[in-house]
Amino acid sequence: MRWNYIKTYSDFCASNSKNDPVYLPMTTNEGRIVNISSVMISPFLRWSGICLLILSLSACDRGGEREAKTDDKEKAPLIIPVEAVSPDRGDIASYFETSTRVEAERKVDVVSKSTARCIALLADEGDKVSVGDIIAELEKNEAEAIYAQSEIQVRQNKTTYDLAKKQYDEGLGSKMDMDNAGYTHEQSLATLETQKIQLENLTIRAPIDGIITARGIQEGMLVSSGFTAFSIMDPGSFILSISPPEKELPRLSIGQKAKVRIDAIPGKQFNASIRRINPSVDPVTGTVKVILDFEKASQNLLRESAFARVKLVMDTRKNVLLIPKEAIVEDNGRKYLYILEEQEGDEGVSEPHLVDIAEETPTRGSLLTPEAEASEDNSAVPVVEPSLVAKRVEIFTGLEDSDRIQVFRGLQDSDLLVINGQHSLRDGTLVRVTNIQNELDAFSDLTADEALEAAEKKREEGQAPAERSGGRGFH
């Protein structure tokens, strides 16, 4: 015969009000009640039975709660946090972008025309000069002496010629003597002119208006003929020389605009335009030389050889639909977006809930209520969280710049498109629009399958504290 269970706990307690032997009513397999007169329960066994009974009841209660939580977990949807914006309308242009250096079209090297020692420097690097200004003097003593001798020789030859001419006029001299005296005089005049030029060459003058950019001589230095003493450039002649590929030649024209940024002048944009297009293509590089002029008003801000970034405007579109390039998902050479739609059967959006964004900056994807927008303290503001579904749509694009792209088919002005978290989505995924950056970062680099796994894990972690708190209630 095998005993199944104690019939009543109250009978057990009533029988054990004292430390006397207790006879427990039990049932057999057949269900008959039998009084056991031959079994005596000790105090140790009595309290062990009480503990086992309590633990059994607790386990039953926890099991029921686990089943309920499991049912709730199966019903709870997996939701991926995303950031979303609406498309904009505006103007966009396509550019040919390149880099070059600022050049001065009018730039000269001033070289010495004589050999002599430098005795004076009258200008230095950075000085503005005008045409004819004296910028250096070379030693002239020897040249001046030679010039003086030439002057004396000219006067002597002039006297000889005058006398020969007088004698010829009076019939006392021959025509040949007169002619020879005349030739000698003319030769001495030419020699004097040469000596004058050589003397003048010992004074170095500025050949153009501009700024001295380099000085190669110093006082006391022996300067030889042909030595570069100075370099001067005209700051009003700054240009840019670029070399677009020959395939761009049909889209180039005189007067075409360009935007220029100089690394040495941050935050400033300069305007330029095409002045000259070389008619031939370089056979080695396959490029076309193009010269651009700056606006005159900005010439004084530029520096020669400064590094320049050029964006030549090739085409322009006005009042078109524009989206961030980062929102596009490419698949097999085709471009897609994820737009947000209300979940089917959803009657509207849920009530606003409080989200702590004290440490976060609202981004373009935040859907803040008007009350939150007007609030000075946005440490906890109501955020509208619609029940939304991500829908993948194919788009067709046009012009693009560094961060935006034109969409001419596949997107409407009223659509809400995902710009952060789109790579973790697939068509039909439930999403929640948020502006909390750490939420977005947790999913930004995940695939669709990895994102769903992460969402499920996050949901389970959120339920774990509730399960632990439920278990403590039975101890």
Image (spheres, helix red, strand yellow):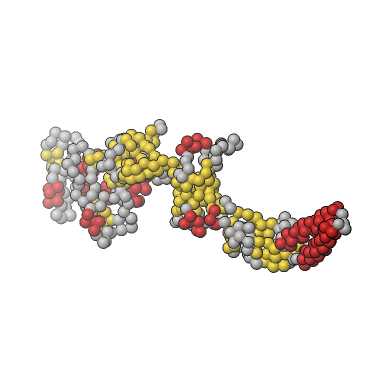
Going 33% across and 45% down the picture, which residue do you hit? 90
**Toward the viewer: 31 or 251?**
251
The answer to whether residue 24 is above or below residue 185 is above
Say which quarter of the image contains residue 409: top left
**Toward the viewer: 145 or 247?**
145
Q: Where is residue 180 in the image (x, y as percent from the top left)?
A: 84, 54
The answer to whether residue 160 is above or below residue 290 is below
The reply, left or right, for residue 475 in relation to residue 98 is left
Q: Where is residue 473 in the image (x, y as percent from the top left)?
A: 22, 52
Q: Where is residue 402 in the image (x, y as percent from the top left)?
A: 42, 45
- Count of numbered tags: 0
The reply, left or right, for residue 210 in relation to residue 433 is right
User: In the displayed image of the protein, which residue is found farthest to the top?
Assistant: 332
Going 50% across and 49% down the picture, which residue do you hit? 293
Q: Can residue 335 be seen in this view?
A: yes
User: In the displayed image of the protein, which residue is found farthest to the front?
Assistant: 170
Going 60% across and 57% down the picture, which residue do you hit? 208
Going 53% across and 50% down the picture, which residue do you hit? 239
Q: Position of residue 379 (x, y in %)?
A: 28, 59
The reply, left or right, for residue 298 in relation to residue 394 is right
